Each structure stands twice: as structure tokens, then as C-alpha cells.
Image: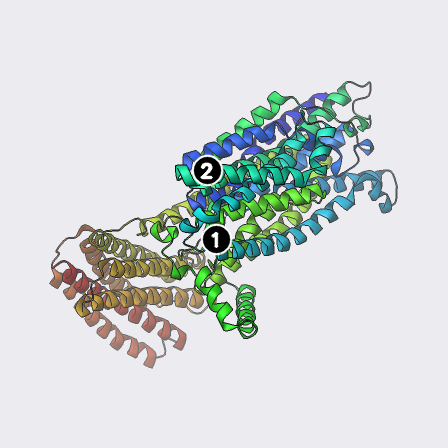
Amino acid sequence: METNLFLIGLILLIIFAIFDLIVGVSNDAVNFLTSSIGSKVAPYKIILIVASLGIMAGVTFSGGMMEVARKGIFHPSFFTMPELLTIFLAVMLTDVMLLDIFNTFGLPTSTTVSVVFELLGAAVAISIIKIINNHESIIELGNYINTAKAMIIIFGILISVVVAFVTGAIAQFITRLVFTFNYQKRMKRYGAIWGGFSLSIILFFIIAKGASGASFMSQDMIGYIKDHSLVIIGVSFLSFTILLQILITFFKINILKIIVLIGTFALAMAFAANDLVNFIGVPLAGYHAYTSAMASTFPLTIKMEALSQKVSIDTSLLLFAGLIMVLTLWFSKKARTVTETEVNLGSQSEGIESFESFGFARLIVRQTYNFFEITKIIIPLKIRQFIYRRINPAFFKTEHNKNENTAFDLIRASVNLVIASALISFATSLKLPLSTTYVTFMVAMGTSFSDQAWGRESAVYRISGVITVIGGWFLTALIAFSCSFIFANIIHYSNIAGVLFLCGLTALVIWKSHHKHKSRTQSKNNYSVLNLKKIKDPSSAKNITFDQIGLYLREIKNILDTSLECLFLQDLSGLKRQVRSKRKIQEWSNIITANIFKIMRLSKIDSEGVNHRYAITTRCLQKIADAHRDILLRSYTHISNHHAGLLPSQVQELREVKKVFCDILNEVELSLTRKQNINYQTVVHHNEKLNYLAGELDKTQVKRILNESSKTRLSILYYSIVGDIMTISRENIKLLNVFHDSFD
């Protein structure tokens, strides 16, 4: 009977392996997709095909890495099969939940760190239970756990973060100094040399990091590669340089596209070869523990020394895992979300920032700015001018400027891939632990910094994003250890009931995160509706912008309608939900304003009357957003501080004001979105009615103040709401005037 329960546990491990492959690939896809997607090196499907081929090649080389899950973190000879299955179930439950949450918020993290600390947490939990049951000292924990592994990984995080960022920044600076942003002409001169260097590094990376784990690579071959690394790189460099020069000279081929696509293949292959263990290593270890135990006379008590031995992995199983990874790559929306985070943080363009700024990021920006001010004193003026002319994108009409959908150019994409490949290969040759996620992400951030993608307008937001991601890496280790530690205890003491409870909890978390991701995606889609990046015709841009303003007014009307009702009912939780919308409204206002500026640049009309209308529209949008924010914050502050609610008479009066106000916004919205020439006087009449009503309410409110039925805070709130509503109404009249003037 007991062995049947453990068979069920093994089946659950296999099921979780599939889920873990899906959530793991969704997060790790950022490692090899960012450079190719950000630079638009090829159509999206071509990029996925290249990455898919890399994954399928890599999974066949991953057999040797599976040892980590069985004996890399703990010593299996101290544990029985039931204890190991408990550890492995706790690990898989934690991993699926943790990675899915990170994917939902679009934060890249290390699947290696997550699985290592999950194994560590669960193993520590079971080890402590064994120590207590055996009446041993806690010092004996060192016999069970390979604690040095965790410390090495933490050290690897700190080193790789700094080294990858600095190396990426320096490499990009030198490369940009050579090629500038207008790199097409210079590629003809010495592009083949750069390409030869890049491809030789990538090729060595493929051999050293990927193929070294393949079954067909003998120890003699691996030793030869390590002993003759410089020879391999040198011969490859000469061969590729000659070949690429021929392609440039006679066939006019853009060799940067070749470099980026081959680099994408290489990183995808390395990811599959090294990170597949993070997803199926634990279930495979559970399978080997179960089969080894069942082959013995006492399956429930025998020590799992068999797991210390090397075990061969069936290639068909690896290919099946690779197929799931490829399908996830093609169909996972969360994989695109995580990739978008890194692309946006490195984008050369201004746009919607994914992260809010905070104090530490502002301090870094300020100190960095001060540092560069000091360097101006040290570096001679002529040298500074020379460097500035070559690395400042403003001096060049770049490929990125021609195609605003490109986050960065092919030069930076190739540097990202080459430097990441070089660092990972070098660390591998020295047997230093590091995460491909950490290296690729920090290299990309270093090249972004060097390329001045983090300008004065965006630096604080981009650095806030980078700090958030790095903080998430350390949080990954903490959460992974803590959750797996707790889950292992629950499973040990509750048996099947605990497993069922945790499975239900995992399903609930995944369901919640799915809806959260859907909501975040919908919010981004709303922003994409407001985006004019693909519009080149000024007339079309103008029409779309008026549609945008109409949607903007409709959203404000709905939010304020709901918020005021929450205020009337003193519904604090409802008001809190509406207050969160103030950031969205301000972002919408900023996006529409930016689009107005784009229309001005597209139109190139130097007319005082036309440009004045643009200025009026911009001011109206900002005043409406400010008034909207003021109503929300005042209402929320009043209720959250437990002040007296509005009097019944005040509620009735404000409902009358709200009705007229909503009628005005409805009329203006219909006019803007449907391009209808509605009766202008109707809107003016509504506005006059609102002004008259406000005047009458002032008299009524004065009486309440005099008889002290309306206290000071209540009176301030009442007057503020009426005043802000009148401001929004007045600005709507101005917008309607601009609309009619624009289409007359």
C-alpha cells in the first residue's frame, strides 16, 4: 500500500516536470531571444525557428548535467526513497509556483538558482527532522548537505553581475567608437574582422559550453579543446574573417544578421544543454530513487547510495523534453512578457517605462552624473569632442531612427551575444559557477548604458527596473529555500493530505497568476492602442489622436463615476482600487501628448494658429489628469482617515453635479471618436448648467458652514470635488473647440 502511494508521488513528479518545463522556458527564453527580437534581425518566426533548432541540439548534450539534481546539493546515501521523494515533491511544487509568479510580472530570474535553493531548503528540512529523530547534534547537518554549493552560487551571483555589466559596457563603448551609429559604411572596411572575432568566440562557446556535455565527446576530445583553446579560436578567426570579407565584398550580405542569428542559436543550445536539469533533473532523480528502491528487499528503508552513481539518460526522453520547450517558446505569452521587460530596459527610444523610479535609483543616477562631470575635467576637450561625435546617436541618422520598432541596432545585438558567450565560455573553462540569465541580462544592460539608451529622460526608470530584477534574483533564493523548507515539512508530517493540499495551492496560484497576467496584458494592449509608432501619415495620426482623447475621456468618466459612488457609500476598498488608476490616466495623458508632438513633427507646419491648438490640447490633457488625480486622492484620504462622511444632502447635490458632468464627457467623447458634428451649443448648455448648479450649491454649502452641520474637512472636500469637476468640464469645451477648428 505504501509503495503505491510513493508511485503516485512519482507520477506527480513527472506531471510537475512538464509544468516546470513550460514555466522555466517562459522565463529563460529571455536569455537567447532578447538580442534578436530587440534588433529585429529577422521576422519573429525565423528567430523562433533558429532558437528552436538550438534548443533541440542542446537537449541532446544535457545528460551530464543531470547529476546535479541527484547529488550536487545533498548526499543521497544519507536518505531513503520516501525521504527523497518528499524532497523532490517540495522542490517541484515550489519551482512551478515561483517561476510562474516571476513570469506573470515579466521578471527574468535564474532557474538554476531557484532549483538549487529549493533542493537546499527541502533537504535541510528533512535532514533536521532526521537529526532530531536520531537525537544527533545540529552539527551533523554538514554530513547531509553540501552547504558549500550554495555559498559558491551566491558568490557567483555577485561577481557575474558586476563583471558582466562592466564588460558589456566597455565592449560596447569600444565597438561603437569604431563603428559609430552609422555603421554600414565602416562594416565594408573592417566588418569582416569584427565578424571573424565574433563568430570564432561564438563557435568556441558552442563547443566549450554545449557540445562538451555530449555523449560523443570523449574525455580526450574535451581535454584537447581545453588545451588548444587559443589555437581553435585563432584558426576560426582567420577562416571566418576571409569568408565574411567575401560575403561583404561580392554578395553585399549584412554579416551582422548572420552573427546575431548564430549567436541566438548558440545561447539557445547552451540554455537547453545546461538548464534542462533545472526542469527535469529532479523528477528523473525521483524516478531513479524509486526504481532503485523497488529493486531492493526493503524499498522503504534502504539508503539511496545508488544515486551517487552516474546514470545514462535516454535520448528520446531528452528530445521529448526539448519538444515541450520548443512548443512553449512558440506559444507562451509569458515568455514574450519576460522578453519584453529586458528589451524595454535596453531600448534606444523613449517610451512607456515598465518601472517607477525610487530613491536608490535616483541616487545612482545623480552620482553617475557627478562622476562624468569630473571626467570632463580630467579628459582633454579635443578627445572628449572626438569621442562624443562618434558615440552620440544624435549625430547619425541610424537604422534605429528609420525603424522605430527596433529597440536597438544590430551592432549592439551582436555585442550582447558575443560578450555573453565569451564570459560564459571563460567561466566554464575555469569551472566557475554562474547563471546564463545573470550574464546575458547584465551584459545587455551594460551595452544599453554605454549606448546612451539610458538618457536623462529614462535613466532613473531603467535603473529602477534593473535594481528590481537584481533584487528579484536574491529574492528567488530566499523564497525558494523558505517555501521548499516549509513544503517538505508539510509533506513529511501530513503525507498524502499535505501533497493534495499543496497541489491545490499550486493550482490556485497558477490560476491567479494567469488572470493577473491577462489583466496586465490587457493594460499593455490599451497602451498599444494609444501608440502612433507605426503611423507615418500626419492626417491619419491626427484622426487616431482624437480617437485616443475620446477613449481617455471615457475612461476618466467611468473612473470618476465609480469613485464618487464609493465616496458616497464610504467604500474604502472600492476607492483604493480606483486610486490605482491615477498612474494609468497620467500615462495615457503622457502618451497622447507624445503623439501630439509626433504629429507636429510629421506635419512640419510652422503655423502659429495650428501649433497653438497643439499647445492647448496638451495643457487640457494635463489639467484633466491633475483634476482626476485630485478627486481620487482627496476622496481616498478623507475616507481612509475615518473623517465624517458626506451629508445626505451633499451626496444628493454631488449626484446632480455628476450627472451633468457625465453628460458633458459623453457628448465630447462621441464627437471625438465618431467624428460627429454634434450640436456644440448642447455641450455649452450643459457646461452653463453645471456652472449655475455649482453657484447654487455654493450658497447651500455656505449655510451648512454657518450652522456647523458641515465641518471644515468635509467642506474642503465638497468644494474641491465641485471645483475639479468644473475644471474637467471647462477643459472639455476647449478640446471640443480644437476638434472643430482642426477639421474645418
Residue 132 x %, y %: 84, 41
Classify 10 Å Cα crowding around label 2: few (below 14), some (14-19), many (20 and above). some
The residue lying toward the viewer, choosing from 697 and 363, is 363
How many numbered discs? Answer: 2
Precedes in sequence: disc 2 or disc 1? 2
Q: Quadrant of residue 118?
A: top right
Q: In which quadrant will I find the N terminus? A: top right
**Residue at image x 71%, y 51%?**
155
Label 2: state its secondary structure. Answer: helix
Which SS class for mark 1?
loop
Q: Is residue 509 visible?
A: no
In the figure, is residue 482 to the left or right of 305? left
Residue position marked by numbered label 2 in the rendering: 246
Between 628 and 340, the one lying in front of the other is 340
Quarter containing the C terminus: bottom left
Q: What amino acid is labelled 2 in the image?
A: Ile
Which class describes the residues within 10 Å of circle 1: few (<14), some (14-19), or many (20+)? many
* Colour mapping: rainbow
The residue that disc 1 covers is 346
Above or below, 708 against 322 in this view is below
Residue at the extreme bottom of the image, as rendered:
706
Q: Is residue 473 visible?
A: yes
Residue, x 74% and y 32% (percent of image)? 84
- Name the residue at 50% across, 39% down: 511
Q: How far across and down, in percent of the image, does residue 322 sit?
A: 56, 28
Q: Foreground: 536 or 681?
A: 536
**Residue 334 image offset from top left, x and y in percent:** 48, 41
Which numbered disc covers residue 549? Answer: none
Q: Amino acid at mark 1?
A: Gly
Residue at image coords 43%, 43%: 518
Cα distance between the residues tagged 2 and 1: 33 Å
In this orientation, which residue lies closer to the viewer: 516 or 308?
A: 308
